[in-house]
Image (spheres, rainbow, N blue to C red):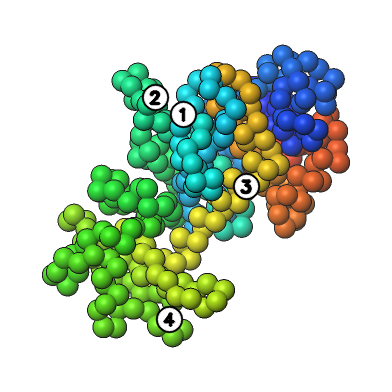
Amino acid sequence: MLQLSTVIMYPLLTVLSTVGKKSFENMGRLIQRSGDTVYRLLNPALISMQVSGEIAQSMFMRKKRLYLVIDDTLIKKISSKVMQGSGMFYDTKLAKCIIAFRLVVGIITDGHFTVPLGCSYLFAKELIDTLVKQQFPSKEDIAQSLIKTAQKLFPHPVITVVVDGLYSTVSFLTWCKTNAIRLEARMHSNRIVEYDGKRIKLRDLLTIKGMRPTGRRMARTISVKWHGIDLELTIVRRLDKEQKESFVFQIATYQALPREHVAAYKKRWAVEMMFRTTKQSLGLQECFSRELETQHNHVAAVLLAYSLAQLDMKQSRLKTPEQAIRRCKTKNASSLNHRFIRILQDIPSFHA
């Protein structure tokens, strides 16, 4: 691996940069260097994610239970039609299709600290051809790779994988059951499962007497089959601010109490917080290169910056990564670089 000072300088510049967009030129002004110099500081994504993984190992080495959350987000490139790999995706917030990258990220969390482990892309239909399929895997391939990475980094803790309904597919659930993966996922209410020897839609389960959680009971778990796969189905009762009732359905590949299934799925909030912070404070969307490889390297560097903020949050006993980022902004690039080098060198894996 390259020297730590070289690996972490670009991520730290994304933390420090506050004036204008986080372009190479703007970040270069922080160290009185040109944009080309900053570009050369940008390491391959594999190196950034390797350092992030080692940070995760140091932070969670004593944990017995961890959660791998896999989710995707849009990296908006609205003003450009020439960025390699960008395509048209539907933005649920804007309620229209926009030009963007669709980024898949896997994070490891204990429920308090969150560290990214890897990232990849899903491409728009109009861009998928034979070459792209060979070079960039499907959503399930990405998820399987992230799971294997987490298992390699954390062979001893119990890891629960948490995903949304996008991964509730026969092939992925079969793979998880075959490989004894603890999976927690959302499932759409129109899916038909086998319960008590009968085929029934999930939403119709609520019509069965005693099935609907009521009163203080907020969840109920039953055993079902879906396409021959044995699953644990949790019916989750939710109340909004006006006490209006709604129900969602979770499936799992392992047995647990209803409240444990509910608590496991709530760990998805960690990845939502990570996306918000990296977009608002670290410039996840603010790379202007036309090259997909450069875009990918920038994203990985920003995710490493988030890992460094989490490490500082733990070291300094801060409550949020935003507090750590604001604290870092009071330093200059050189002193901040030296500070994190000292912190990382106290981690055994960084001595080599």
Q: Do the residues labelled 2 and 4 touch (CB within 8 Å)?
A: no
Q: Are marks 1 and 2 in contact (CB under 8 Å)?
A: yes
99 or 320, nearer to the observer:
99
What residue would you read off at disc 3? Answer: 276
Residue shown at 71% from the left, 54% from the top: 320
Tell me which label, 2 or 4, sits earlier in the chain: 2
Rendered image: mark on residue 87 = 1
Kindly indicate the quadrant of the structure image that contains residue 17.
top right
Count of all numbered marks drawn on residues in the image: 4
Task: Give the mark toward the camera: 3 or 2.
Answer: 2
Q: Residue 130: x, y in percent?
A: 31, 20
Task: Give the mark toward the camera: 4 or 3.
Answer: 3
Q: Is disc 4 placed on a helix, strand or loop? A: loop
247 or 333, nearer to the observer:
247
Tell me which label, 4 or 1, sits earlier in the chain: 1
- As drawn, 129 above or below 306: above
Task: Give the mark toward the camera: 4 or 1.
Answer: 1
Kindly indicate the quadrant of the structure image that contains residue 149.
top left
**Distance of label 3 from label 2 (alpha carbons):** 27 Å
Q: What residue type is labelled 2?
A: Leu
Q: Residue 215: x, y in percent?
A: 44, 85
Q: Horizontally, is 34 left or right of 235 in the view?
A: right
Tell me which label, 4 or 3, sits earlier in the chain: 4
Rendered image: mark on residue 127 = 2
Q: What residue type is labelled 4?
A: Arg
What residue would you read off at disc 4? Answer: 217
Q: Is disc 3 placed on a helix, strand or loop? A: helix
Tell me which label, 3 or 1, sits earlier in the chain: 1
**Going by the picture, which residue comes out furthest to the front?**
96
Residue shown at 35% from the left, 34% from the top: 138
**Distance of label 4 from label 3 (alpha carbons):** 32 Å
Quadrant position of the N terminus in the picture: top right
